[in-house]
Amino acid sequence: MNYKIVIDPGHGGSDPGASGNGIIEKNLTLEISKEMYKLFKSLGIPVYMTRFDDTTINPKDRTKKVLDAFGNDPNVIVISNHINAGGGTGAEVIYALRNNATLPNLIAEEIKKTGMGYRKSFQRTLPKDPSKDYYYMHRNTGKTQSIIVEYGFLDSPGKDPYILKTKYKELAHATVKGVCKYINYSYQNDNVYIVKKGDSLWSISKMFNTTIDAIKQANNLTSNMINANQRLIIPKGNQIVHTVVHGDSLWSISVKYNVSINELKSYNNLTSNVLYSGQKIKIPNNNRRYNMYNKSEENVKKLVYKK
């Protein structure tokens, strides 16, 4: 992976940014940025954030954080997240004079799919010196590919405020998808798991051949508590996924990967032996066999390895 991502949640601390319709810019940009951070981490793309909390950062320190993260390199993509104000409608992406509109336009395509309107992708120069960028996040970030994403107008008379408040995670996903298209990197839509009744972080970690700590880190969880219908990002690991082709059967797949048919069905929540071409079958870890037992006093599940 040659590309690296720096996410900059606009404003913060003593600088709240714009506000209106129950939206405070510094808070919403942080929530959007955290969601993006989780997604890039889960995809295995190196990522850094300039702030994780309500911290004041002056322009000099902010751009220093950007350049210190992964160096002054054109393969570093800087995404500065903002919410617009002024009564307009729709999102827009502003890009540096040294860059082109390819990345902004790919992000625009994805943002429009959320229902948010899109105004334009553009560059802006200093009035007294058209050779320089207007915004310091472009002007003082070296050779990086620096963009400012304005996700909509919080004071719009249209639908912007509603979408900003209810679909901010979708807007974050849209930007990540646009970046993935730009760097020709697969965006995994199937790395989100919907928690079912009876699930635990332990059972989910075994389902996807990962660890509890990896899931907690990918989702910024501070405890092991999860709820039914909660969406969890599953970090990429060593999960083997078999794509069904014509002639495959559960029997042939079980032989190929040295697992039983019942294991395959249980692991993939299959209720029959019928498969179809293109279907994705997750393969259980075949290096170990697991038994679970309940310790009723502590109400926890432990893992016993049979070698």
Image (cartoon, grey):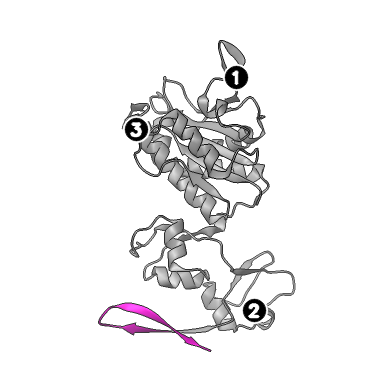
Say whether marks 3 and 2 touch (CB < 8 Å): no
Quick one: SS at disc 3?
Answer: strand
Q: Is residue 132 magenta?
A: no
Circle nearer the N terminus (3, 2):
3
Q: Amino acid at mark 3?
A: Ile
Please give the name of the residue rendered at 51% of the width and 25% of the height, measured from the top-left corner: 136
Instruction: Please tell me whether the stretch drawn in magenta is mainly helix, strand or loop.
Output: strand
Q: Which residue is mark 1?
A: 132
Between the residue at mark 1 and the residue at mark 3, the CA separation in whole angstroms equals 32 Å
Check residue 23 in the rendering and tell me which mark sits there, or answer none: 3
Whether residue 159 is visible here, answered yes or no, is: no
Circle nearer the N terminus (1, 3):
3
What are the residue bounds of the magenta stretch? 292-307
Where is residue 152 shown, x and y percent of the image? 46, 30
Say whether marks 1 and 3 touch (CB < 8 Å): no
Q: Which residue is mark 2?
A: 250
Q: Amino acid at mark 1?
A: Lys
Q: Can you tell which of label 3 and label 2 is closer to the viewer?
A: 3
Whether residue 236 is visible here, answered yes or no, is: yes
Please give the name of the residue rendered at 27% of the width and 79% of the height, measured from the top-left corner: 298
User: In the shown orientation, is residue 258 left or right of residue 118?
Assistant: right
